[in-house]
Amino acid sequence: MMACATLETMRDELALTGKNVNVYVSRMRQDGEWGGELELIALSRVLQQTIRVNDCYSFPVENTEPPIELEFEAQHYTPKQ
């Protein structure tokens, strides 16, 4: 839910993806939906925490906390061990 609330504030960025913001956020609020890059960007912003997906990409936020590190495996994200 935290990511969805932030996604609603990212209308200009979501519009660039060609997604209908209201439809997309409504779908993401449903149980069983899996988040992806857009949701990680939203969480990075709301948590003010860098999220790094190893071997893929990073969503940097200026802070002194160590980044949240994830692995992308078999089409889903898992915490880096």
Image (cartoon, rainbow, N blue to C red):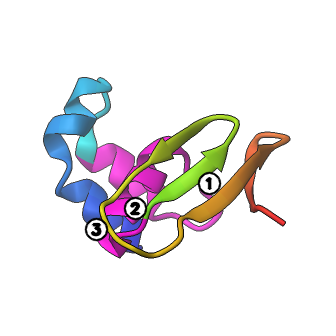
Residue matched to label 3: 5
Looking at the picture, tell me which residue is in the foreground, 30 or 37. 37
Residue matched to label 1: 34
Looking at the picture, tell me which residue is in the foreground, 55 or 77. 55
Q: Tell me the crowding category of disc 2: few under 14, some 14 to 19, or many 20 or more residues within 10 angstroms, Cα based.
A: many
**Dot placed on the residue nearer the N-terminal end, 2 or 1:** 1
Residue matched to label 2: 44
Residue 63 drawn at (x, y percent)? 33, 70
Tag 2 secondary structure = helix
- What residue sits 44% from the left and 60% below the top? 50
Kind of residue indicated by mark 1: Trp
Tag 3 secondary structure = helix
Kind of residue indicated by mark 2: Ser
* Left or right side of 55 for 59: left
- What residue sits 32% from the left and 31% below the top? 19
Say above or below: 16 vs 21.
above
Most common secondary structure along the magenta stretch: helix
**Dot placed on the residue nearer the N-terminal end, 1 or 3:** 3
Q: Which of the 4 image quadrants contains residue 13?
A: top left
Say above or below: 23 vs 55.
below
